[in-house]
Image: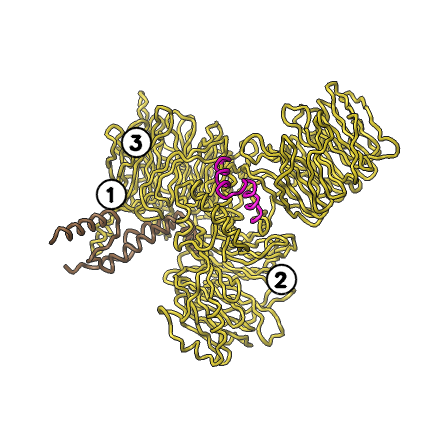
Amino acid sequence: MFLYNLTLQQSTAINQAAIGNFAGTKQQEILVARNNVLELLRPDPSTGKVHTLLSHQVFGIIRSIVPFRLTGASKDYIVVGSDSGKIVILEYNPEKNVFDRVHEETFGKSGCRRIVPGQYLAADPKGRAVMIGAVEKQKLVYILNRDSATKLTISSPLEAHKSHTLVHDIVGADVGFENPVFACIEVDYSDADQDPTGEAFQNAEKVLTYYELDLGLNHVVRKWSDTIDTRANKLIAVPGGTDGPSGVLVCSEDYITWKHQDHPAVRIPIPRRPDPLQPSPTGNGDDVDTGRGIIIVSSVMHKLKKGFFILVQSEDGDVFKITMEYTAGADGTIGGVQNMRIKYFDTIPVAVSMCLLKTGFLFVAGEFGNHYLYQIENLGDDDEDQMEYQSAELPQGEEAEDVLVYFNPRGLRNLAPVDELESVAPLIDAKILNLAEDDSPQIYALCGRGSRSTFRMLRHGLEVSEMAVSELPGNPNAVWTVKADKKQEYDNFIIVSFVDATLVLSIGETVEEVTDTGFLNSTPTLAVAQLGDDALVQVYPRGIRHIRSDRRVSEWKTPGNKTIVRAACNQRQVVIALSGGELVYFELDPSGQLNEYQDRKEFAAPITALSIGPIPEGRQRSSFLAVGCEDNTVRVVSLDPDTCLQSLGMQAVSYTPVSLTIAQMMDTGTSVGTLYLMIGLQSGLLVRTTLDSITGTLSDTRLRLLGSRPVKLFNITIQGAPAVLALSSRPWLSFTYQSRSKLIPLSCTMLEYGSSFCSEQCPEGIVAIESNNLHILTVEKLSNVFNHSVIPLKYTPRRFVLHPQSNHFAIIESEHNTWCPSDKARKLEEKAKQMDDGDGLLLEELPPDQFGLPRAESGKWASCIRIINPRDSETTQLIELDDNEAAFSISTCVFNGQSGETFLIVGTASNVTMSPRTCTGGSLHTYKFIENGTQVELLHKTPIDGIPYAVCAFQGRLLVGMGKTLRIYDAGKKKLLRKCENKQFPNNILTLHTQGDRIVVGDVQESVHYASYRHFDNRIVIFADDTIPRWITTTTMLDYDTVVGGDKFGNIFVNRLAAETSEEVDDDPTGNKLVYEKGYLQGAPHKVEHAAEFFIGETLTSITKTVMVPGGREIVVYTTLLGTIGCLIPFQSKEDVDFFQTLEMHLRGKAPPLCGRDHLSYRSYYVPVRNVIDGDMCEQFNSLPNEVKRSIAEELDREVHEISKKLEDVRNRVAF
Amino acid sequence: MSSAAMNVNAQLEHLQSKHVGTGHADTNKFEWAVNQHRDTYASLIGHNTMLAYSAVAENESLGRKKFEMMEKMLQPCGLPVPKDD
């Protein structure tokens, strides 16, 4: 077995974001790291939409990114700290739209290790040096400079190691142009490790250390060190030099302290959110259960023309604004901080990074869930409702007492959301089903954490936003838009053709009918175009109408009783096909007259489709005409004056061509692009062939099935580049994205005819018709290949199951650290009692979708069971569990002797603690589906003694995995009845699958176990296990002997039981062999074979064997926690395996991963890669420079286009 | 002690000073466990997916999880056992 790994959607989580002028222009870009993908985003300041410029898979784990700019330069470089053991400096090349690697310096082993730097990265604000640090001990400083050719240079590393020291954070302090200083939070553990009394541990100090890079002496010294709060976790650099007081803000639990060498510390408390469920604070702040402290998790500093401010965000999502007052001497020297103020700003989703743009946008890379772009509408200075706390009014100094301060939570006031980047991370579970009965199945996914959790339905297709719909009188059959004048920016008219009439609409503030345009209204129209500078042309069955700007009309009538059947035009050329297969060609002469070419061309078969190419820039005409005939041929005809109407090439197709278009696609990475002839066939196939722009010969034909209806093609513009709209039973869009051509369906209804649309409100739209409606659509997010429909959930979802009879989903949601309803009611009551005697703080809960649920304590759970109708996106029932009970597993089950009725089984446990894993008791709830599956009714609860992490139907009974025990239950009147048990599983059963008598059990730590149920003596016997300990998160049976699974560390594997073992186990008439067989290697008697191993890099959360495209083969589709959706495609021939293996090998050599990680060792992170070829690596072939492509193709003995066709084929045949 | 043994010892010492956690003949169970735990926490912090995994399970923010793990690295296995010598 050989598999081909392909990513369908890259990770949607962001783990780091940084802002800078990476392209070297005035505009700021946002660089985000998505675990193993570097992506450059550009927010459009006029529309507020975030566009993706480039995303690049680096085959390594990106742990830190930091931008820096050399003094006096206008372009930012990117430093990347990854798991490669190398520091890598990248530069964005806007011409080619690639990241160029400028430097790559090795300093240690690869992998995310304790003492290998890469975790922390800090740059000097003046861009003179960077420090890269590890979690423990090692820190390296690299000096950055320019050489005489203004190229960036990097020095050899300078060590700033300190052994036995843990590092919590590193930042580059702003010291102006003095020697660069890096500030670190350090903890020395050497004493704590040696002292058995625990005194040293209690007294362990956290220190803030300044490391100074002496540029003159070229070495690093520990300049200053001072103890800080032992609960400090984060540093924020404060502007220095002439901009501010320098130093750092040390964020610790509940406090933010400004510290700097030779200055007294200034401390302010972090305001707290009044918790409606905790006893309210009394007047003087003491005698209060304070719960745990708040920490700051992200921050952003912004310099204004005068001064600066810092936004910090707490772990609950509350954003605070910090400002400082400092002394400034007459000579510009700046002293220490006099006063520091903190004020509540707004509450937004918790971010991993916040980026503030100069244009007033705040980009929030959410740690879970969607990412947002906010417009800053107000700086919050005039917000009188919020207290501003000042350090000058609060106790300071070493021994200062604790203070508690509160803010007033409210809805968004200062920020306004403008754009949202959909993110499915954390993706907890997914199922791939075709409930909507579309062409391809949908992905149903459980996403999110806490109150921002969602149930999502992902459909393959670009998201389309509908700008307008208007009804038309009757069913039109075609639509066009035209400008009245070549120089106009926007379209002026929409022309709609009906069976016997034509309607002209003018585009302005509103769209309304006009009659004085010169268009003939009483006839259907075949084609409309803007001609020459300011004329229009209308082709209708009996002639051609050429309308000048002064409303002069010249007409050309068809001879005799012939009619025009097809027409094609561009700005200077008109071609018509007369009934009978005659082709007439017209061209605009310099005086603006439309002249017929002296000859006509006869075709043997009737003409079914026509298309003229676009006029190349600076030319008079397009030299190609494509003609499709009923005899299943498409011919390219020359329009050059010398060879006019001579045939240049022919393409035979399998069905009648119904539509043709010649389009210039910008998929080469240069401004030239490639000319393609696209052919839409009667059968729903799309044929794309490359048209040589000089000779007109056709080559490199590629086929794609778009749907069940004839394919109609239309040229449009998407993001400034030409694109083709292809309409079949589903609309598709062929476009170029990051200089790669893509063909993706649009998520909208079936359309019949389309045209591009450009108006002031909608600069890049599509106007299309569907029965008797006119739609105006836009496509914006070209990077999202899935369209989301979202149902919000209450708590973190855990598992879900489909009720197949009603197509409803049952979802279980459980939230740790949250009050269950009865606890909440009790708390509120207590609070209400307390309220009687005094102060009026708010009692009602804050809206959870903005503020989250109030935090309880460890070991408290809230949980619910929800029934969802995915078709109408509605919740039909919500059952809240109470008394600290949480649901962990769910399944449907059809019990024997219950007349085939489907029951819902939910496994729950009460008072669960995470570490150690304990509970006071579990329970199996049995529900009955009622009212067509929209509701469930509780039948009974069965008490059990562990946490049931897995339940599964098995031969009319129920398998339950709880801890080390696997049990079989049968239905009973009052509860489920225990029938059989096996307690020999190693740790904790997480997944269960069955086929026949075979049961495959996934253990949390010890990989998969194959067990067999023996009817005659009612026993479960484990007969095979794995030799590798795998921390299973999900598994699926591929066939009776094969299991594919994923683990917590991001490996995907295929385990297979050898055929003879499988037979031997099943073919055991006495049944004793299985029981008495001796164990092998301290485990089961048989071991599974490892058929495939591959490292994905993200925790796998679901694996499904499915068919993704109509007519495709079965593939394995997986999802990961960080939102990656990928697939493993089995190869069918040995030749393909050889080909891709060689291609992969060449790519590893010629295009090594960007961040310096060795590709082979990355994919073999935990277990050596086996029988899997990395399709993501192979597909990078398409983005290589042409010379490299050619040299690889030469070594493979192929043409470049053959390789890219093969890459496209292997993807398109089974996936998208 | 022969010079070869001296050399080996010196090499070992060099390794021990360069690579934290390299064991020696007298490494006890506690020290070994502490090293394992510190390595594990460092790895969990380093892999974004693992940090997210525990954060989702425990309903905490990533920042809090990272902070907690860093704090635990100081003394991951409780108080050290007294040395015999």
Q: In the picture, which chain is brown?
A: B
Q: Dot 3 falls on which chain? A: A
Q: Nearer the viewer, residue A379 or B6?
A: B6
Q: With A32 as the anchor, is A476 left or right in this view? A: right
Is residue A316 shown in magenta? Answer: no
Q: Dot 2 falls on which chain? A: A
Classify A336 as above or below A951: above
The mark lying in front, picked from 1 and 2, is 1
Whole-Å distance between the Cαs marked 1 and 2?
A: 63 Å
Question: What residue is drawn where x is 37% and y is 53%?
Answer: A289
Amino acid type, callout 3: Pro
Amino acid type, callout 2: Thr
Q: Earlier in the sequence, mark 3 or mark 2?
A: 3
Amino acid type, callout 1: Lys
Q: Quarter-wise, where is residue A464 in the image?
A: top right
Whole-Å distance between the Cαs marked 3 and 1?
A: 19 Å
- Bounds of the magenta span? A1185-1210
Extreme top residue here? A591
Q: Colour of chain A?
A: yellow
Query: Which residue position is annotated with label 3?
Result: A180
Query: Which residue position is annotated with label 1?
Result: A162
Q: Which mark is residue A934?
A: 2
Q: Picture coordinates of residue A118 (x, y %)?
A: 35, 43
